C-alpha cells in the first residue's frame, strides 16, 4: 500500500486558483464525544455533537443527505488542500485515503511520543483535535459524495467509455477496498494499547484532553462511519453487490460490500461485548442493574446506533436483526466455541459468563428504549428477545448447573427488568415457576449479604399482605427501588413480581390467569403441603396472596384455604400454625378491602383459634406447651385487630372472628398475656364505636369503599358485632374488677364497654338493663370495693367524653351519677396511699396513681354540678392545675359556703342530701389506714375529715347529717383504744390527730351550738374530746414549745374574736376548770404548772373581753394562788389573775366588774375562818390590779373578819387584822376610813 502513495503531493487544483472560489471550512462534523458539557454529566444523556444529537442517524435511516448544509461550493478544503467537490473522490480516491492514513499515523505517533507535562497539554490537545477534525471531515465528505454524486454503474463498452466514466464506474469497488484497508489499519478496539483504552474511564473536568483520548474516539468514529458508508453505498446502488477486485486473489475469498459490512459489524460487536465483559468483572451483583455495560457515553451512543441501523436493515433488506447478531456472539461466549468459522477472540477471563449474558441483555434492552433521536421512551423501540432469554433461563434454572441464590437472584432481577420493558412471556414465567415450585422451602438467602438478603417471615397479616402487594405492583424500571431490588428481595419475591406483571397483562384480561392457574394449582397436594417448611409455607402464602391480588380473589382464597386444611393438625408446630393463620387473616384483609363477606374465612379461623385456646385453658396442658401456644394465640389477636382496624364498615361478618375461644382464653391468661388480650379488646371496641357513629351520622364511613350497606343492614350487623363483644369479653371483665391489682387495660376496656352501652344500649346483656350505663359505672367506677387505680383510670376515660357527661347531667337513668363520680374521686384521693409503698412512695405505681388522680381532679372540677357549686361559692380553681389535696379542700369549702348562703329550707335540705351522697360512707374508706397505720394515709384522712367537720359544721348539725358527725367523733376522735387505760392509740394516729385536732374542735363547737336535737350531746362529746387530748398532749412540766403548739390551744386561738371561737374557748376553759384545776382536798391537781401555762397562753393569745368567759377559770386561779407556794405556780397564777382582772375591769364601763366581784365575794366567804391570811394575800394582788374591785368588797371583808374573831371567842386577832390592814392600805381613802372604823 505504501507503493501507491508517494511522498510528493501535487494539489489537484492549479495553484493560481483564487481562495474565494474555495468553500469555507465546514462546521465541525458529527463525532463521538464524552467531553464535559454542562448538565450532561448528571443525566448521562448523549452528546449534542454526536451522530444522534446532530441527526446523522435519522438522516441515514430516512435516506437523506448526510450533511445538507456542507460541501455546497465547487471546491472543498480537505487535508489542507483544495479539491473539486464533485470529482475529487472519483479522480483521487487513493490519494485522499492515503492522506487520511497519514493523519491517523500522525495522531498515533503523537500518542506514543506525547509528554505528560502540564505545559504541553494545551498544544497537544489542539493539535490532536485538528488531526481528528481533518479525518472526520474527510469521512463526512465521502458520505456526502456517495449520496449526491455516486450513480449506479452502467455497462460500458470497451474503448468507448470516457476515462472519468471508467473511474466513476470503478469507484464503488475502490471504496470497498479502501474501507477494508482502513479497517485493517484501525484494527480491533480491544487490541488498542492500554494507555489508549484507559481514556474510556478518564474524568474530564476541563476542556483540555490528551491525544490518546482523541485517538480512541477517532477509532470509534471510523468504526461507525465505515458501517455508515457501506450502508449508504448499498442504498445508492439499490442492493447491487460491490466486489473488491484487488483482494480476490489475495485472500481466496471475494470481498464485497456485504461481506465487509458483516465482518466489520461482527468484529465491532465482538469488541464492544469484550469491553463490556472486562467491565463486568468489576461489577458487584448488588449493583448489576445500576451499573451500565458501556464505559462512556460514546460507547453507549455507538450501541444505540448499531441497534437502530441493524433493525432498519432487518426491516428493509431483511437481514438479521440486532438480537440475532448479539445472540450469536453470546452463544459463542456461553459455549466457548467459534461461530461461523470466525475467530471472535472473546476474552476467556470471565468466570460468570451466564450472569454476564443476563447483564448485557438487560442493559442492551434498556438501550433499545431510545429512539433514533436519542430520546428515552416508555414504549420499546427494539423487538423483544424472549426466545434467547428462554434458553438462557433454562440454563439458569438447570439443577445440574448448580446456580446459587446470589446468581439466580440477579438473573431473575434481569428477567423482571426485561418483562417491564417487553410484554410478559408465559414461557418464561412457567420456566421460573417450575424452578421455584421445586425449591419453595428454600431460604433464598445470600450469606455474604447478611441480614439484608434474608427473607424474613412477616410478623403480622397486614405486613404479609403489604409484602404481597408490593410484589403485585412492581416498581418502574427507572426507579431506585427497582435498582435496589437485589438487596431488598430474594429471587422468589422478584419472581412474584414477574408473575404479577404477567397476570396484570392488559391486552388479554383473564387469559394469563387461565394459562398459569392450572400449572400453579397442580403443584400442591397433601404430601407437598406436609413437606413445606416454615419458610416454604411463607412463600406459599405470598404466592397465593399475589394471585389473590392480581387474579380471582375468591377462587384463590378458597383454594388456599383448602390446601392449608391439608396440613396435618396434630403434627403442626405452633409457629407453622401461626403462619397459617396469618396467611388466612391476610386473605381476610383483602376481602375486607374489596368489601366481600368474610364469614366463611372467619368461621374457619375462629374454629381453629377455639381449639388452641381450649388447649391453653386446660389445667392439664404442660407449661412448656402453654408457653409455645401463647405466641400462636397472640398472633391471632394481632391479626384480628388489623382486620378490625382495616374494615371501614364492620358489616362483612367480622364478628365471626370473635368466637368462644376468647371466653376460654381470657381466664387462662397471665398478667402480661392478659394485657395483650385487653389491648385487642380496646381496639375492637374503639373501632366498632367509630364505625357505628359514622354510619349513624353520615350513612356510611367517610373512608369506606364505594360499597356501603343500607342503614338497616349496618345497624343489624353492628348489633351482631356488639353482641359478640358483650358475650365473650364482658363477663370476664366483670369478674376481674374487684382485684386489688387489676391490669391497667381493665379500666380502658371497661370504659370502652360503658361508651358502647351509651351508643348502643339495646346491645347490652339483660342483667344490665334497664339502665346499662349506670350499671356498668356502678361496677367499674362507683363500687367502694374497687381499687383506686382502676377507678381513676376508668373515670378519666369517661369524664373526657362530652356525651357521657351530658348524659350524667340530664340523661335517662343518670340519677346521681355526678355525685357518685365525686364520691369516687373523694375515695380515690383518700385511699391513694393504700397503693404506695411506704419505702418507695415514688414507685411506678405511685407515680401512675398521682398522674391519674391529677387528671381525675381536673375532670371532676369540670363536671357541671361541681362547676355550679364553685361558681355559687365564688371559688374558682384557676388556670393552674390543682393537685388532688387542695382541690378536695376547695370542693369541701364550696359546699359549706353554698350551704351557709342558702335561705330556703328546701334548698338546704336538698344540699344536705347531696353532700351526703358526695361523701358516702366516708369512714369506711379510712379503715384500711387504721389497720395498716400508714403515716401519710392517716394524715390525709384526718385532714380531709377535719376540713369537712369544720367547713360543713352547720350542714353536719342537721338531723340528716348528724349521725355522720357523731360517727366521726366516735371513730376518729374518741375510739375505744383511747379510752382503754392499758392501751395507747398508735403513734401515727396521735400524730395525725395532733395536726388536725383544731379543725375538729372548731367544727364540733359550731355544730354543738347549732344542733336542735343533739346539741347537749354534741357539747358533751366536744368536752370529752377536749379533755382527752388536752391531757394527752399536755407536758408534765411547762415547756414553751409543747404548750404553745398544743392542738387544743391552737383550736381556741383566733386573731379576731368571734362568737364561734368564744364558744369553743368557753368549753375549753370549763374543761380546764372542771378537770384540770380541781383540788382534791389540800392536794393540788397534777401538772398544775403546765395547765396554768396553757391557761395563760390561751388568755394571752385571745383578746376576749366578755367577763362571763374570762371569769370561768378565776375561782381555780384564786385557789391556786392561795394554796400553792411553789414559785412557778404562784407566778403563773398571778399572771393569769392579772389578765383576767385587767380585762374584766376594762370591760366594765361603770364601776367594778360584777362577775369579778361575785367570784371574789364567794372566794372570801368560802375560805372564811380557814385561809383568812392567804385570802388577804390574794386580795393584796387583786387590790394592786383593781383597787376599785376590792373597795367594793370592804363590807364583806370587814364582816368576815368580825365573824371569824367572834367564832374563835378570843377577841381581836392581831395577825388577821394586820393582814387586813395591809389590804386596806392599798385601797386609798376608802381603806383608811375602814381602818379607822376597825380601831373603833
Image (cartoon, grey):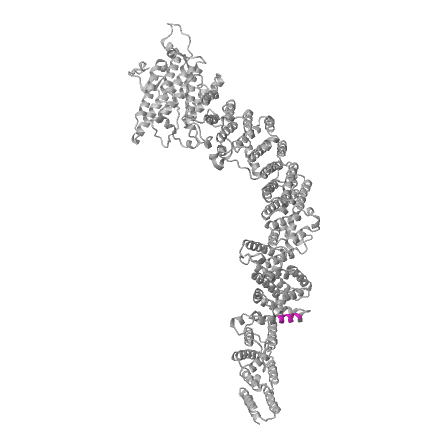
Tell how many labels: 0
Magenta stretch containing residue 826, yes or no?
Answer: no
Residue sticking out furthest to the left: 8
Q: Main secondary structure of the magenta part?
A: helix
Does residue 246 lie above or below 607 as drawn? Answer: above
Q: Residue 64's spot in the image, x, y percent? A: 44, 19
Dividing the picture into quarters, in which one does residue 107 lie?
A: top left
Residue toward you, 1125 or 1064: 1125
Q: Quadrant of the N terminus?
A: top left
Side (left or right) of 1236 relative to 806: left
Seen in the picture, residue 383 relative to 405 is either above or below; the reply is above
Magenta highlight range: 1017-1024
Nearer-the-camera pick, 316 or 258 = 258
Residue 723 in the image: state x and y as whole percent. 68, 44
Q: Where's the C terminus, which quadrant?
A: bottom right
Q: Quick check: 1022 left or right of 74?
A: right
Q: Is residue 27 visible?
A: no
Residue 45, quarter of the rendered image:
top left
Residue found at the very far bottom of the displayed protein? 1240
Q: Is residue 187 left or right of residue 387?
A: left
Q: Nearer the viewer, residue 611 or 514?
A: 611
Q: Position of residue 734 (x, y in %)?
A: 65, 50
Residue 351 visible within the image: yes
Residue 541 falls in which quadrant of the image? top right
Residue 894 locus on image (x, y percent) = 61, 61
Amino acid at each position: 500500500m505504501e507503493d501507491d502513495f508517494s511522498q510528493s503531493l501535487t494539489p489537484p487544483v492549479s495553484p493560481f486558483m483564487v481562495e474565494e472560489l474555495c468553500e469555507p471550512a465546514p462546521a465541525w462534523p458529527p463525532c463521538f464525544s464524552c467531553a464535559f458539557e454542562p448538565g450532561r454529566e448528571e443525566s448521562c444523556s448523549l452528546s449534542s455533537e454526536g451522530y444522534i444529537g446532530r441527526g446523522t442517524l435519522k438522516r441515514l435511516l430516512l435516506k437523506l443527505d448526510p450533511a445538507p448544509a456542507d460541501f455546497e461550493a465547487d471546491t472543498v478544503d480537505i487535508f489542507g488542500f483544495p479539491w473539486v467537490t464533485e470529482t475529487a473522490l472519483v479522480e483521487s480516491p487513493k490519494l485522499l485515503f492515503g492522506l487520511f492514513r497519514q493523519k491517523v499515523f500522525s495522531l498515533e505517533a503523537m500518542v506514543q511520543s506525547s509528554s505528560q507535562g502540564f505545559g504541553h497539554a494545551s498544544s497537544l490537545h489542539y493539535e490532536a483535535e485538528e488531526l481528528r477534525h481533518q479525518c472526520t471531515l474527510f469521512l463526512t465528505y465521502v458520505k456526502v459524495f456517495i449520496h449526491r454524486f455516486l450513480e449506479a454503474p452502467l455497462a460500458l463498452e470497451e474503448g468507448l467509455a470516457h476515462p472519468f466514466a471508467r473511474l466513476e464506474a470503478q469507484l464503488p469497488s475502490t471504496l470497498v477496498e479502501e474501507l477494508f484497508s482502513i479497517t485493517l489499519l484501525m484494527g480491533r478496539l480491544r487490541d488498542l494499547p492500554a494507555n489508549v483504552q484507559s481514556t474510556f474511564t478518564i474524568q474530564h473536568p476541563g476542556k483540555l484532553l490528551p491525544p490518546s483520548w482523541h485517538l480512541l474516539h477517532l477509532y470509534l468514529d471510523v468504526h461507525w462511519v465505515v458501517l455508515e458508508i457501506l450502508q449508504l453505498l448499498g442504498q445508492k446502488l439499490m442492493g447491487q453487490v460491490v466486489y473488491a477486485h484487488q483482494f480476490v486473489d489475495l485472500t481466496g475469498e471475494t470481498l464485497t460490500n456485504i461481506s465487509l459490512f458483516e465482518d466489520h459489524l461482527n468484529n465491532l460487536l465482538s469488541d464492544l461485548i469484550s469491553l463490556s465483559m472486562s467491565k463486568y468483572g468489576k461489577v458487584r451483583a448488588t449493583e448489576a442493574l445500576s451499573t451500565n455495560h458501556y464505559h462512556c457515553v460514546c460507547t453507549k451512543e455507538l450501541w444505540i446506533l448499531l441497534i437502530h441501523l441493524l433493525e432498519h436493515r432487518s426491516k428493509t433488506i431483511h437481514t438479521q436483526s440486532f438480537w440475532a447478531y448479539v445472540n450469536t456472539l453470546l452463544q459463542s461466549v456461553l459455549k466457548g466455541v467459534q461461530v461461523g468459522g470466525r475467530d471472535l477472540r472473546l476474552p476467556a477471563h470471565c468466570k460468570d459468563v451466564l450472569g454476564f449474558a443476563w447483564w448485557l441483555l438487560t442493559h442492551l434492552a434498556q438501550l433499545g428504549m431510545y429512539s433514533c433521536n436519542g430520546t428515552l421512551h416508555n414504549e420499546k423501540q427494539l423487538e423483544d428477545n424472549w426466545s434467547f432469554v428462554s434458553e438462557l433461563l433454562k440454563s439458569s434454572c438447570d439443577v445440574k448447573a448448580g446456580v446459587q441464590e446470589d446468581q439466580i437472584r440477579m438473573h431473575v432481577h434481569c428477567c423482571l427488568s426485561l418483562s417491564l420493558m417487553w410484554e410478559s412471556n408465559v414461557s418464561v414465567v412457567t420456566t421460573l415457576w417450575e424452578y421455584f415450585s421445586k425449591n419453595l422451602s428454600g431460604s433464598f438467602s445470600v450469606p455474604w449479604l447478611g441480614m439484608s438478603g434474608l427473607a424474613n417471615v412477616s410478623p403480622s397479616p397486614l405486613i404479609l399482605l403489604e409484602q404481597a402487594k408490593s410484589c403485585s405492583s412492581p416498581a418502574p424500571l427507572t426507579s431506585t427501588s427497582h435498582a435496589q431490588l437485589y438487596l431488598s428481595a430474594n429471587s422468589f419475591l422478584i419472581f412474584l413480581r414477574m408473575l404479577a406483571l404477567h397476570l396484570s397483562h392488559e391486552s388479554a384480561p383473564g387469559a394469563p390467569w387461565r394459562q398459569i392457574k392450572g400449572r400453579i394449582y397442580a403443584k400442591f397436594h397433601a404430601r407437598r403441603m406436609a413437606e413445606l417448611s416454615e419458610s416454604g409455607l411463607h412463600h406459599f402464602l405470598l404466592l397465593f396472596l399475589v394471585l389473590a391480588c392480581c387474579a380471582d380473589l375468591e377462587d384463590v382464597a378458597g383454594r388456599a384455604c383448602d390446601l392449608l386444611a391439608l396440613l396435618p393438625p396434630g403434627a403442626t408446630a405452633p409457629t407453622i400454625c401461626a403462619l397459617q393463620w396469618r396467611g388466612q387473616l391476610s386473605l381476610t384483609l383483602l376481602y375486607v378491602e374489596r368489601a366481600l363477606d368474610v364469614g366463611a374465612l372467619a368461621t374457619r379461623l375462629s374454629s381453629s383459634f377455639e381449639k388452641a385456646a381450649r388447649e391453653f385453658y386446660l389445667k392439664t396442658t404442660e407449661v412448656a406447651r402453654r408457653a409455645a401456644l401463647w405466641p400462636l394465640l397472640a398472633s391471632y389477636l394481632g391479626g384480628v385487630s388489623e382486620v378490625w382496624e382495616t374494615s371501614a364498615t364492620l358489616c362483612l361478618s367480622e364478628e365471626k372472628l370473635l368466637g368462644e375461644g376468647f371466653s376460654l382464653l381470657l381466664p387462662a391468661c397471665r398478667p402480661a398475656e392478659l394485657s395483650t388480650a385487653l389491648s385487642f379488646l380496646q381496639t375492637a371496641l374503639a373501632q366498632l364505636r367509630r364505625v357505628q357513629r359514622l354510619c349513624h351520622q353520615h350513612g356510611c364511613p367517610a373512608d369506606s369503599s364505594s360499597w356501603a350497606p343500607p342503614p338497616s343492614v349496618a345497624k343489624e350487623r353492628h348489633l351482631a358485632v356488639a353482641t359478640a363483644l358483650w358475650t365473650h369479653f364482658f363477663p370476664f371483665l366483670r369478674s376481674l374488677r374487684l382485684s386489688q391489682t387489676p391490669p391497667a387495660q381493665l379500666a380502658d376496656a371497661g370504659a370502652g364497654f360503658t361508651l358502647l352501652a351509651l351508643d348502643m344500649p339495646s346491645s347490652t346483656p339483660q342483667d344490665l338493663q334497664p339502665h346499662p350505663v349506670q350499671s356498668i359505672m356502678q361496677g367499674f367506677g362507683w363500687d367502694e370495693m374497687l381499687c383506686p387505680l382502676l377507678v381513676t383510670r376508668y373515670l378519666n376515660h369517661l369524664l373526657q367524653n362530652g356525651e357521657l357527661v351530658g348524659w350524667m347531667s340530664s340523661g335517662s337513668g343518670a340519677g346521681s351519677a355526678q355525685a357518685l363520680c365525686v364520691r369516687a374521686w373523694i375515695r380515690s384521693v383518700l385511699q391513694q396511699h393504700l397503693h404506695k409503698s411506704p419505702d418507695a412512695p415514688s414507685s411506678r405505681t405511685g407515680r401512675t396513681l398521682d398522674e391519674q388522680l391529677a387528671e381525675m381532679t381536673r375532670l371532676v372540677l369540670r363536671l357541671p354540678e361541681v362547676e355550679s357549686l364553685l361558681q355559687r361559692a365564688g371559688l374558682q380553681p384557676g388556670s393552674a392545675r390543682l393537685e388532688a389535696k387542695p382541690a378536695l379542700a376547695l370542693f369541701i369549702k364550696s359546699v359549706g359556703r353554698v350551704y351557709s348562703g342558702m335561705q330556703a329550707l328546701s334548698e338546704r335540705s336538698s344540699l344536705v342530701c347531696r353532700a351526703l351522697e358526695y361523701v358516702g360512707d366516708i369512714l369506711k374508706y379510712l379503715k384500711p389506714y387504721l389497720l395498716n397505720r400508714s403515716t401519710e394515709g392517716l394524715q390525709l384522712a384526718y385532714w380531709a375529715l377535719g376540713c369537712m367537720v369544720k367547713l360543713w359544721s352547720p350542714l353536719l348539725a342537721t338531723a340528716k347529717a348528724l349521725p355522720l358527725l357523731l360517727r366521726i367523733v366516735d371513730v376518729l376522735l374518741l375510739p375505744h383504744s383511747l379510752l382503754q387505760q392499758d392501751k395507747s392509740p398508735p403513734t401515727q394516729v396521735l400524730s395525725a390527730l395532733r395536726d388536725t385536732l383544731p379543725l375538729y374542735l372548731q367544727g364540733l363547737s359550731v355544730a354543738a351550738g347549732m344542733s336542735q336535737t343533739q346539741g347537749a350531746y354534741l357539747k358533751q362529746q366536744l368536752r370529752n374530746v377536749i379533755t382527752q387530748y388536752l391531757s394527752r398532749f399536755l407536758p408534765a412540766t411547762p415547756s414553751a414549745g409543747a404548750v404553745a403548739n398544743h392542738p387544743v390551744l391552737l383550736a381556741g386561738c383566733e386573731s379576731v374574736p368571734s362568737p364561734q371561737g368564744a364558744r369553743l374557748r368557753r368549753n375549753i376553759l370549763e374543761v380546764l376548770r372542771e378537770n384540770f384545776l380541781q383540788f382534791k382536798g389540800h392536794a393540788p391537781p397534777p401538772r398544775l404548772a403546765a395547765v396554768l401555762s396553757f391557761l395563760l397562753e390561751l388568755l394571752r393569745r385571745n383578746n376576749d373581753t366578755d367577763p362571763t368567759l374570762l371569769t370561768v377559770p378565776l375561782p381555780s386561779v384564786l385557789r391556786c394562788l392561795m394554796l400553792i407556794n411553789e414559785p412557778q405556780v404562784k407566778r403563773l397564777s398571778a399572771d393569769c389573775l392579772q389578765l383576767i382582772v385587767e380585762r374584766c375591769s376594762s370591760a366594765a364601763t361603770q364601776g367594778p366588774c360584777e362577775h369579778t366581784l361575785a367570784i371574789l365575794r364567794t372566794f372570801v366567804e368560802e375560805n372564811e375562818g380557814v385561809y383568812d391570811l392567804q385570802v388577804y394575800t390574794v386580795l393584796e394582788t387583786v387590790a394592786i390590779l383593781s383597787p376599785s374591785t376590792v373597795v367594793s368588797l370592804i363590807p364583806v371583808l370587814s364582816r368576815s373578819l368580825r365573824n371569824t374573831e367572834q367564832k374563835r371567842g378570843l377577841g381581836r386577832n392581831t395577825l388577821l387584822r394586820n393582814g387586813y390592814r395591809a389590804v386596806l392600805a392599798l385601797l386609798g381613802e376608802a381603806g383608811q376610813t375602814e381602818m379607822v372604823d376597825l380601831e373603833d
